[in-house]
Amino acid sequence: MDFKRFLPFGRKAPRVAVIRLQGAIGAARPGSQGLSDATLGPLIERAFKRGKPRAVALIINSPGGSPVQSSLIAARIRRLAEETGLPVHAFVEDVAASGGYWLACAADDIWADATSVVGSIGVISAGFGLDGLIGKHGVERRVHTAGGSKSFMDPFRPEKPEDVARLTRLLEDMHLAFKTHVVARRGAKLHSDADLFTGEIWTGAQAVDVGLIDGVAHAVPKLKSLYGDKVRLIPYSARQPWLRRFGASFGADTANAMIEVAEDRALWARFGL
């Protein structure tokens, strides 16, 4: 009989907390399944502080979404990493693009499958211009504001050059924040001769060559190589809303769920997924 496992002071297997970051990134809404700082915050806090882990691993599969929520989640991860002194490793599954890559850069190193999609370091705003459609059907748009910019980018009115210029300035500021985060986290690993901030995407194998990730690797074998074959991987993932576990939703939640599904599919479709 192996009596070592009964000894109170026996050497314990190292633990690594594994946080799954799956889905589009957006502000918390009732019944939402997306990633937000409000919903992920308590989970991330537990992962760093419960059970004295040796490290934290992020399993990322996200096409991006809200720049603000991406920034908040990444900042929380960095704050906790600095408070606890724990290393953070990111592993990309299908995609870590746009806000998904923002999250990956919160880690000290980034690993991906050779065929993962990585990058899309840019900011996008998309919508529809419906003024011609309602005009054909004799619908008149009536808007009354107190404040000249309150009808900014109204999709039912003709697009204004000054609105487009203002939107461009907003997007450029967000893009600058994204670039600053990537450069601060990846530093000298980024290849200076590559234009990395155009919104372009790379496969995992290509991303190694331009310095966006550290190598091609999968989570379990890589973590075993770093912390030993006996490493214990402790999973943490956001819980699905109770009704959604049974495929049920009612009233306004049904409409919200349909909108969220459509938005999520549009984000994933940009990367062929």
Image (cartoon, grey):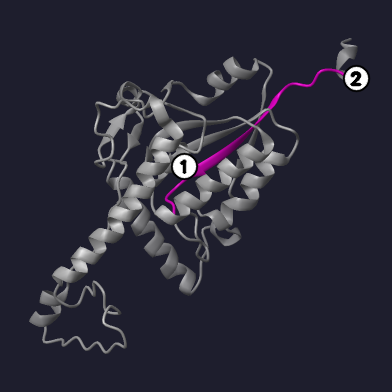
Q: Which residue is mark 2?
A: 6
Q: Amino acid at mark 1?
A: Leu
Q: In the picture provided, is 157 more to the left or to the right than 169?
A: left
Q: Quadrant of the N terminus?
A: top right
- x, y (%) of residue 240? 57, 53
Image depth: mark 1 or mark 2 in front = 1
Query: Regarding mark 1 in the picture, which secondary structure is present there?
Result: helix
The part of the image, by quadrant, that contains residue 159 is: bottom left
93 or 148, which is in the foreground?
A: 148
Tell which residue pokes out farthest to the top in this image: 1
Image: 235 above or below 171: above
44 or 94, which is in the foreground?
A: 44
Q: Residue at x 16, y 88 (%)?
A: 140
Q: Amino acid at mark 2?
A: Phe
Q: Residue at x 53, y 20 (%)?
A: 222
Does any portion of residue 10 appear in the rendered image?
A: yes
Q: In the picture provided, is 48 more to the left or to the right than 179?
A: right
Q: Residue at x 13, y 75 (%)?
A: 158
Does any portion of residue 98 appear in the rendered image?
A: no
Which region is colored magenta?
9-25
- x, y (%) of residue 28? 51, 61
Q: Residue at x 56, y 41 (%)?
A: 78
159 or 190, which is in the foreground?
A: 190
For residue 165, which numbered disc appears in the image?
none
Q: Which residue is mark 1?
A: 103
Q: CA distance from mark 1 to mark 2?
A: 41 Å
* Disc 2 crowd, CA 10 A, few/some/many (<14, 14-19, 20+): few
The part of the image, by quadrant, that contains residue 143 is: bottom left
- x, y (%) of residue 148? 26, 82
* Disc 1 crowd, CA 10 A, few/some/many (<14, 14-19, 20+): many
